[in-house]
Image (cartoon, helix red, strand yellow):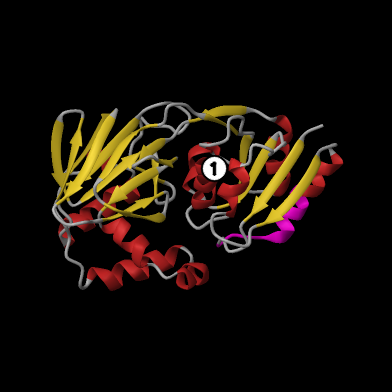
């Protein structure tokens, strides 16, 4: 018998109580002991994940990438964290693309029952974990400026609307990233732990959240033509080969800017530069199909 705790974020864009109930029913019929908890405030997932009394075999996060990040943050102070599983229910669900996670309730339940796992590696940005990316530049400005109500109402479209709005008045910052003794300059700097960015868009084909290793992407310019070229390359899965873009593997890096520049981690706002980047000392265990 598996003890399974499902934590659902009811404010996530893809929250569907019926879907979660179906997964609960499938697991219970297979002999699992299942509990569902709905979060009521920010940081609650982190609190639950950090509790050393958390006596479950699998902690299932029904939410987006930010909710998964909360769980990893809690795991940092839990000496014996449970295995992690994810029910994709966010806006971009980048981790779901990374792992090829199923969407149908029965397939999700079957993957939890099969309990096939892989290591989940992560990076650290000023000591805070990121499983997907940490970045500074236009994308972070959008994340910081995005109204939560707009995100809940329009999902991915809210990011586009906010980008257009702030793009009319935004003044980009010149940044430097120190990468293992070298210095690179650019207007957008993304430290990535995996292949995908912003959804199903490949930025680093050689990376994977289930293997160790971080990469940093630097976009040298973000004027309208450069931004358009970057966007087209992103859609085509050729960002790593685009003009004005470099992708470099690293062990330790630091993003610096003359003036504090917004930073985002796994799609949520996180302070401003400077930000020190490095790989996490160890990985966790995540359920995969």
Camera-side residue of 165 and 100 = 165
Q: Which residue is mark 1?
A: 74
Q: Residue at x 33, y 36 (%)?
A: 204
Does the rendering let one see residue 65?
A: yes
> Label 1: how many residues lie within 10 Å, few (<14), some (14-19) or many (20+)?
many
Relative vertical location of residue 218 with respect to residue 229 in this rendering, above or below: above
Give the quadrant of the N terminus: top right
Residue bounds of the magenta highlight: 13-23
Query: Is the magenta region chiefly helix, strand or loop?
Result: helix
77 sits left or right of 260 in the view: right
Is 49 one of the magenta-colored residues? no
Q: Residue at x 22, y 73 (%)?
A: 168
Relative vertical location of residue 176 with respect to residue 118 in this rendering, above or below: below
Is 19 one of the magenta-colored residues? yes
Residue 255, quarter of picture: top left
47 sits left or right of 224 in the view: right
Camera-side residue of 259 and 203 = 259
Measured from the top left, where is residue 289 in percent x and y? 62, 34
Does the rendering let one see residue 88?
A: no
Q: Secondary structure at mark 1?
A: helix
Measured from the top left, where is residue 78 in percent x and y? 57, 35
Measured from the top left, where is residue 58 in percent x and y? 68, 37
Relative vertical location of residue 110 with respect to residue 7 in this rendering, above or below: above
């Amino acid at each position: 018998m598996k003890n399974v705790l499902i934590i659902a974020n009811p404010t996530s864009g893809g929250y569907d109580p019926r879907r979660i109930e179906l997964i609960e029913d499938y697991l219970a019929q297979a002999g699992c002991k299942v509990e569902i908890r709905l979060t009521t405030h920010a940081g609650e997932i982190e609190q639950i994940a950090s509790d050393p009394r958390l006596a479950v075999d699998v902690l299932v996060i029904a939410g987006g990438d930010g909710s998964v990040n909360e769980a990893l943050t809690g795991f940092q102070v839990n000496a014996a964290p449970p295995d992690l599983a994810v029910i994709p229910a966010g806006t971009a669900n980048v981790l779901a693309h990374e792992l090829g996670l199923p969407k149908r309730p029965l397939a999700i339940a079957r993957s939890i029952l099969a309990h096939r796992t892989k290591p989940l590696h992560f990076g650290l940005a000023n000591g805070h974990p990121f499983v997907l990316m940490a970045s500074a530049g236009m994308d972070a400005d959008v994340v910081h400026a995005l109204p939560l109500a707009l995100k809940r109402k329009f999902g991915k479209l809210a990011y586009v609307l906010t980008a257009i709005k702030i793009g009319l008045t935004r003044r980009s910052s010149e940044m430097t990233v120190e990468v293992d003794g070298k210095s690179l300059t650019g207007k957008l700097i993304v430290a990535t732990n995996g292949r995908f960015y912003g959804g199903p868009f490949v930025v680093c084909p050689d990376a994977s959240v289930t293997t160790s290793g971080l990469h940093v992407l630097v976009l040298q310019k973000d004027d309208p033509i450069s931004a358009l070229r970057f966007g087209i390359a992103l859609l085509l899965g050729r960002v790593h080969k685009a003009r004005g873009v470099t992708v470099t593997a690293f062990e330790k890096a630091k993003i610096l800017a003359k003036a504090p520049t917004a930073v985002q981690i796994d799609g949520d706002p996180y302070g401003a530069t400077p930000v020190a980047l490095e790989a996490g000392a160890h990985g966790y265990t995540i359920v995969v199909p």
